[in-house]
Amino acid sequence: MLITPRDREILRLAVPAFGALVAEPLFLLADYAIVGHALGTTAVGALGVAGTVLAALMNLCVFLAYGTTAAVARQTGAGEHTRAMRSGVDGIWLALGIGVALIAVFWPLAPAVVELFGASAGQSAQAVTYLRISLLGAPGMLVVLAGTGVLRGLQDTVTPLVVAIGSFALNAALNAWFVLGLGWGIAGSAWGTVLAQTLGGAVYLVVVVKGALRLGTPLTPGLAGLKQAGTAGFALFVRTLCLRMVVTVGTMIATRMGEAELAAYALATQVWTLLAFALDAIAIAGQAITGRALGAGDVAATRAATKRMVQWGVWSGIVFGLLVLAAGPVLPGLFDAEPRVAELLLALLWPVALFQPVCGVVFVLDGVLIGAGDQRYLAWAGVWATLAYLPAAFLASGLGVVVLWCALGVWMIARLITLVRRAADDAWLVTGA
């Protein structure tokens, strides 16, 4: 594709966002590799179960990033810089409150939540240990989400890249030390994550506080702002709840197929997540560009940027799909996978790769509509797509883990239909602060 000025704007935001987004799943893959080499298949399955629960909790709160990005970008486009930072401060307070609440609620519920997956006794015990320790990092994790949203809304994706690389590199180093060096087992992997995420959250606190002081924005929480953030975030919460339901149901079905199937499904999920974060970089650019353009009242620029970002999404999906197929023979060895796990993982990589172009379009349009503040439609679209997925997943439960993974394709196609339909009309093109 010929690089245009619009492409350069997209790339200016998307390339650093890509680095920041891809850092997390890359280092989580490193966690799987460390745990797999040191502790074996049972621990990998336990990490898959606990990681699914933790990821579900964190991703249900992704509205702290997405909602804040949209609000700050729109107000920045309208020239309301103090209001933009006010939204950021309220987002940080909301993140801290939710983080503390998650610890209080899910610490005692950890055994019951893990039991829902039907894992073996050895896997369940290790999964509970990992989940309980990791919950202590929830406030830091959520502050990272909110702080990232503030900076993206301000059109800064470089600082989140620096913080992501630093915190997740620390996470990998600590996990290697705690698991391989000190022999702490799966608890060591969890403690490495807690320390790294808490430090990352502290960095964002410093950045946001400095920005607020520079603009004279109060650092105390505003009840009106918290209410507005919570209301706007509820629709995104419903959207993300549907997404996590799909991932969780798939993991629960894979768990009941056997330890090898669960381990392969967990590893394939991490590859899928890595690619999803990579493609989501364009969606992040879409959130920031759409919010700023609509805040400034420029509908034509919004339409043109959306069209171009969809093209980027398609081509990126094709490239990533080919890379997955090329890397397929190498991936099982990275995790020291047992022969049966390696065989299943290689089979799963085919549907993972084939659906990447569809993912590229879905993620871009999702980001554009989030940036436009079209959260209510996204919530309903998520419900309908999930209703399409669930019957396909349960029908696949007796047909093997590869067919189970193909059910995700049904879900992605349902999302594609709902998002393309919405993007084609004008209802989401609301301008102003």
Image (spheres, rainbow, N blue to C red):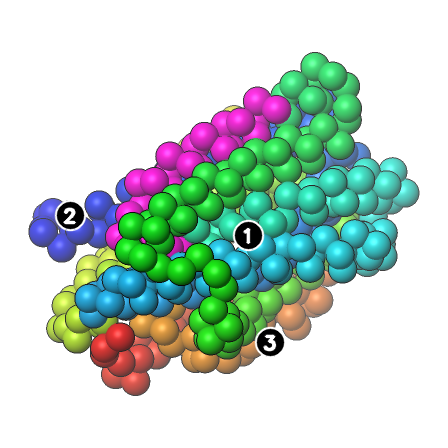
| Quadrant of the drawing holding the C terminus | bottom left
Q: Which residues are magenta?
A: 148-174
Q: Position of residue 55 (x, y in %)?
A: 61, 51
Mark 3 and mark 2: Cα distance apart in space: 39 Å
Residue 65 lies left or right of residue 398; in this view the side is left
Q: Dot 3: what SS?
A: helix
Query: Is 250 above or below relative to 300?
Result: above
Q: Residues within 10 Å of mark 1 (few under 14, many from 20)?
A: many
Q: Residue at the location (75% across, 31% down)?
A: 186
- Mark 3: amino acid: Leu
Q: Residue furthest right?
A: 121
Amino acid on which disc 2 is placed = Arg
Q: Nearer the viewer, residue 227 or 37?
A: 227
Residue 4 percent across, percent down from the top left: 9, 51
Q: Earlier in the sequence, mark 3 or mark 2?
A: 2
In the rendered structure, which disc, 1 or 3, sits on the residue that comes first in sequence? 1
Residue pointed to by mark 3:
387
Q: Which residue is mark 1?
A: 142
* Mark drawn on residue 8: 2
Q: Nearer the viewer, residue 58 or 331?
A: 58
Magenta span contains residue 222: no
